[in-house]
Amino acid sequence: MTVRSARAIAGLLCGLSLFAAAQEANRTIKVALTDDKVGSEPTTFLAVVGDWAVVQDAGKSVVSVDGQKWLNGQAARGLAEKSRTIYGSRYDQFMDNVKAFAYFPYAVAKDIDDFQNGEIAMRYKLIGGQLDQCAGILFNLKPNGDYLTVRFNAKDHNVVLWTFNKGVRKFVKKGVEDVDVPMSTWNDLKIVVKGTQLQAFMNGKLYIDYKLAEPVSGKIGLWSKTDSASFFDDYTVTLAGS
């Protein structure tokens, strides 16, 4: 083998390694409900706060949150065990903060440990709710229970970014304009994160373009508010390199 041939082969192998690394860094995960039982809590999403279940919608399994059966604010069943599953030995502090946010149902995607850069997309359908009609994407969930969410609320007619920090909920950024969507129809919600830059889209339109105070790093999932009744489907995560 000549020196030139050896260099060519080494270059090819290096290129293949870089390509494989890029493929891994930009992999897409679709959270499927294949093994989840209709009528039971989802296993792919760990219900932390609120009443979550897998239901049928037009013959397809989807995740449901029903705040209409849950008006007083309470953690989901088996919170301690689920907290250990999410954060291991650090679950005590997480549980304390969960109880502080008990009026905001959420469920954590079980098999995605740390979302930093990329996209989170889902479909949602608003079914009911007297106080709120809400669906959102949970992200940047920390071991102490702090997190961020981008949500749509039909009662407020807007897409908004909220932060939940040490038991305090705080408004961060509102979408560029108010918007209405019909009840009982499927809609798309997506966030794109690159470093500290966050963009939020609904039904293909950009509503939020905002620079966060620090990079995102944490667990992700589904989010709701008070007595909202909503369906969630096609939860898809694209993990991108930094």
Image: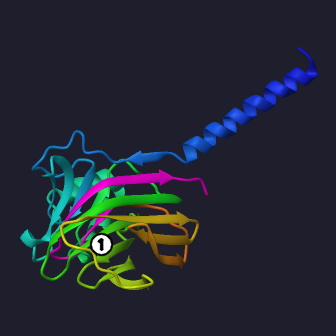
Residue type indicated by callout 1: Asn
Image color mode: rainbow
Splitting the image into 4 quarters, where does residue 32 fall?
top left
Q: Is residue 30 left or right of residue 17?
A: left
Q: Position of residue 202 (x, y in %)?
A: 39, 70
Q: Give the residue pinned by disc 1.
A: 97
Highlighted magenta segment, given as a residue range: 222-242
Between 219 and 53, the residue placed more toward the observer is: 53
Q: Main secondary structure of the magenta part?
A: strand
Q: Position of residue 213 (x, y in %)?
A: 54, 78
Quick check: is 237 in the magenta stretch?
yes
Q: Quadrant of the N terminus?
A: top right
Q: Nearer the viewer, residue 188 or 10?
A: 188
Q: Is residue 183 left or right of residue 14?
A: left
User: Is residue 147 visible to the viewer in this orientation of the structure?
Assistant: no
Image quarter where the C terminus lies is bottom right
Q: How many marks?
A: 1
Residue sitting farthest toward the left: 69
